[in-house]
Amino acid sequence: MTAESEIESLFKKMLKDYEDRPQKDEIYQVDVRDFGVLKVQWKICGIEGYQIFEDDKISYKFGEKIDDPDIILTIRNKDLALEFLRGDTFKFTFGAGHKGSFKLYKTVGWKIIDTDMGKKRSRITKPFLTAYFNQKKDFQKEAHQIHCSHEHNEPSSYEVTFADALERKRFIEAIQTLPDWVFRIKGVIEFSDAEKPLLFQYVGGRFEFS
């Protein structure tokens, strides 16, 4: 099977697998109340399809475009598309893109670079996914709830890197709305109102800074 054929087959399966989710997933029910109807256009290595998320159903079409989508999700790299569609886990970082878009990058390694403050460990990345948001809607409030990945039956982990210092209040508000399946978070976070980075730990709904 060629990469193109496998991407097409897995893409169809992903769309089909999500069709029955509203009846089974309590987290989905909470998310969709915040979003309302959400129209998502996928473009995976030149293959198109879309999903419409509603409170009682998820409908989809393969090989078609939807008028006036709320979000357009684009994956161009065939190898990364296959990893995503197979449900593989990998470390990623993200950042702002062109004209208000949002980009995810897969971490493929690390390198040491020289800076004015000495040597620094720097991430080596590959572009993974680009999200374009409909400018007619305000997605800032709900942005932390958008999940561009499959469900996994086994526990999985991710690494997230923030390009800039965070606003403490908004970070805590996001943490307090995490779904039940997020059990453990640990990392160093730089806040805009703090003199130095803080160690953050989260376990089963409880969290602390030190």
Image (cartoon, helix red, strand yellow):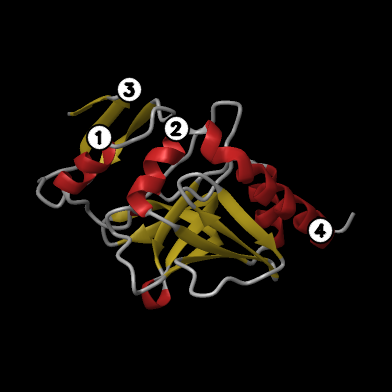
Q: Which mark lies nearer to you, 4 or 2? A: 2
Left or right of residue 135, residue 87 in this image: right
Residue 59 picture quarter:
bottom right
69 in relation to 55, above or below: below
Which of marks 2 and 4 precedes in the sequence? 4
Residue 10, image x and y in percent? 74, 50
* Residue type (three-letter) at the residue carrying disc 2: Glu
Which of marks 2 and 1 precedes in the sequence? 2
Tell which of 192 and 108 is nearer to you.
192
Residue 205 picture quarter:
top left
Q: Which residue is denoted by mark 2 in the rendering?
A: 26
Q: CA distance from mark 4 to mark 2?
A: 35 Å
Which residue lies at the image location 11% right of the left edge and 45% below the top edge?
Answer: 194
Which of marks 3 and 1 precedes in the sequence? 1
Quick one: SS at disc 2? Answer: helix
Q: Which residue is denoted by mark 1 in the rendering?
A: 176
The reply to whether the C-beta atoms of the residues labelled 1 and 3 are less than 8 Å apart is no
* Residue type (three-letter) at the residue carrying disc 4: Ala
Q: Which mark lies nearer to you, 1 or 2? A: 2
Q: Residues within 10 Å of mark 4 (few under 14, many from 20)?
A: few
Q: Which residue is denoted by mark 4 in the rendering?
A: 3
Which residue lies at the image location 51% right of the left edge and 57% below the top edge?
Answer: 105
Tell which of 25 and 196 is nearer to you.
25
